[in-house]
Image: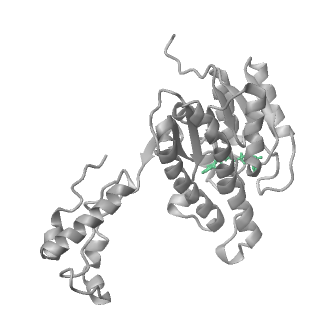
Amino acid sequence: SDGKLRYDGRVAVVTGAGAGLGREYALLLAERGAKVVVNDLGGTHSGEGASQRAADIVVEEIRRAGGEAVADYNSVIDGAKVIETAVKAFGRVDILVNNAGILRDKSLAKTSEQDWNLVHDVHLKGSFKCTQAAFPHMKSQNYGRIIMTSSNSGIYGNFGQANYSAAKMGLVGLANTVAIEGARNNVLCNVIIPTAASRMTEGILPDILFNELKPKLIAPVVAYLCHESCEDNGSYIESAAGWATKVHTVRGKGAVLRPSIDDAVTPEYVKNVWSQVTDMSKAKHLDAIANASGSLLEVLEKLKAGGGEAVEDTFEFDSK
Ligand code: NAI
């Protein structure tokens, strides 16, 4: 081969593939040999209405370029139906890119329960439903690549996006556990954090950024994450403008909140050591929940052995 990453024999489901980022993912995967399910409900950016047009146009584009694709018009909330389209048309599912999304931006005070629910249903529940439906197929064939789509709005917060931020951070949590549950069967799950010009960000991103933030620049990153040669699992990858980076959570060294195991923790003591509690100069990334609980056991043992001073050497496990 000429070293090109290929997806021949693979079946990819891309949700919300009728426009924006999803369209670029679908076009690239199809160009590289994948059979693609172009899922799109075809409603407005705030989640109203439905239309077959969005998905049909992308399927047409793929076929004209010599690729293989079928349209799926279900809402991702009906994840089982979306995956069924893949299995009926192509007999399997190897790749799932959870990408479909809507916005209902309001300040917290003005966010209605409906705004909250619909945003959560499409982003979080939709990704859950599609992933849950694809999971048994992927596990039984010992191969699967799953992408969750988060957002800097979730990671950092963004005025007027309480519902969206919460759902997008929820997807990080979902990915964390899917990555663990699939690992044994080579079903890997990673998170993309994109910034791109689309109908979703029109009028939100400054013009000078908008014109340079082409969705096409992010598609190769997602395609690589979906390739069999990519062994990342549980990574959060931010990408935009022809650039990408891994993003990590980190945990500080912390502080012991009492002189010895026999002492109570008091608000005054907490206040006194607060600068140590919030000091991130020795922060590290933890690879697994076991490391988090493991370090708690160390804290306890050292407290028992002779008090707060002795815990200096906690957090000596490896970090990557
Ligand atoms: P977009 O609005 O261009 O595309 C989203 C697509 O999802 C639309 O074609 C829409 O019809 C479809 N969709 C909406 N609800 C659906 C449902 N229930 N079932 C199936 N399809 C549905 O938006 P864009 O920008 O391409 O966004 C793609 C993903 O990337 C979204 O999850 C978004 O939250 C996320 N994202 C985008 C950023 C950006 O800068 N564009 C930033 C961070 C995250």
| Rendering coords of residue 51 (x, y %) | 87, 44
Is residue 152 rendered to the left or right of residue 262?
right
Residue under the image location 38 percent in, 52 percent down: 288
| Rendering coords of residue 225 (x, y %) | 52, 35
Establish if 227 lies above or below 269. Answer: above
The outermost residue toward the top is 1
Residue under the image location 23 percent in, 81 percent down: 258
- Write down the quadrant of residue 22 in the picture: top right
Residue under the image location 58 percent in, 30 percent down: 141
Of 239 and 97, nearer the camera is 97
Is residue 235 rendered to the left or right of residue 107?
left
| Rendering coords of residue 308 (x, y %) | 17, 75
Report the number of discs: 0
Establish if 43 lies above or below 227. Answer: below
| Rendering coords of residue 97 (x, y %) | 63, 40
Is residue 40 rendered to the left or right of residue 26?
right
Of 197 and 23, nearer the camera is 23
Is residue 88 visible in the rendered structure shown here? yes
Establish if 220 lies above or below 261. Answer: above
